[in-house]
Image: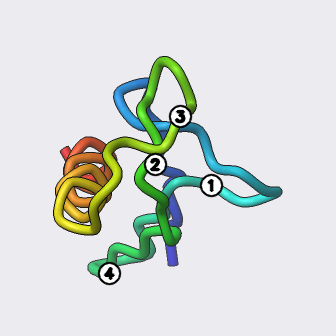
Amino acid sequence: MDCRILSTEKAPAAAGPYSQGVIAGELVFTAGTLPFHRETGDVVGDEISAQTRQVFKNLTSVLE
């Protein structure tokens, strides 16, 4: 099975020794992500709603 590592500068880098995502055959696996701003590394927003939006923005960037 072919595996391809997903990596983008449009989302924060993985915070550990793992990749942002992997495509394995027809499956896509993404790493857990935190509500970090890509450029500053700071947590975005003070409320869970803003942080949740940032998490999905980061995941969307990896999947695109």
Given contact means CB atoms under 8 Å apart, are the residues at marks 2 and 1 in contact? yes
Badge 4 element: strand
Q: Which residue is mark 4?
A: 27
Q: Quadrant of residue 59?
A: bottom left
Q: Is residue 27 above or below residue 41?
A: below
Amino acid on which the number 2 mark rests in the picture: Leu
CA gap, disc 2 and disc 1:
7 Å
Q: Residues within 10 Å of mark 3 (few under 14, many from 20)?
A: few
Given contact means CB atoms under 8 Å apart, are the residues at marks 2 and 3 in contact? no
Q: Is residue 29 above or below residue 7?
A: below
Q: Is residue 20 above or below residue 11?
A: below
CA gap, disc 3 and disc 1:
20 Å
Towards the viewer: 11 or 52:
52
Mark with earlier residue (4, 3):
4
In the displayed structure image, the side of residue 49 where residue 22 appears, left or right: right
Tell me, what colour scheme is on the image? rainbow
Q: Quadrant of residue 56?
A: bottom left
Mark closer to the observer (3, 1)? 3
CA gap, disc 2 and disc 4:
12 Å
Mark with earlier residue (2, 4):
2
Residue 19 x %, y %: 62, 55
Q: Which residue is mark 1?
A: 19
Mark closer to the observer (1, 4)? 1
Mark with earlier residue (2, 1):
2
Amino acid on which the number 1 mark rests in the picture: Ser
CA gap, disc 4 and disc 3:
31 Å
In the displayed structure image, the side of residue 25 where residue 63 appears, left or right: left
Q: Which residue is mark 2?
A: 6
Q: Which residue is mark 3?
A: 42
Mark with earlier residue (3, 1):
1
Residue 24 x %, y %: 44, 74
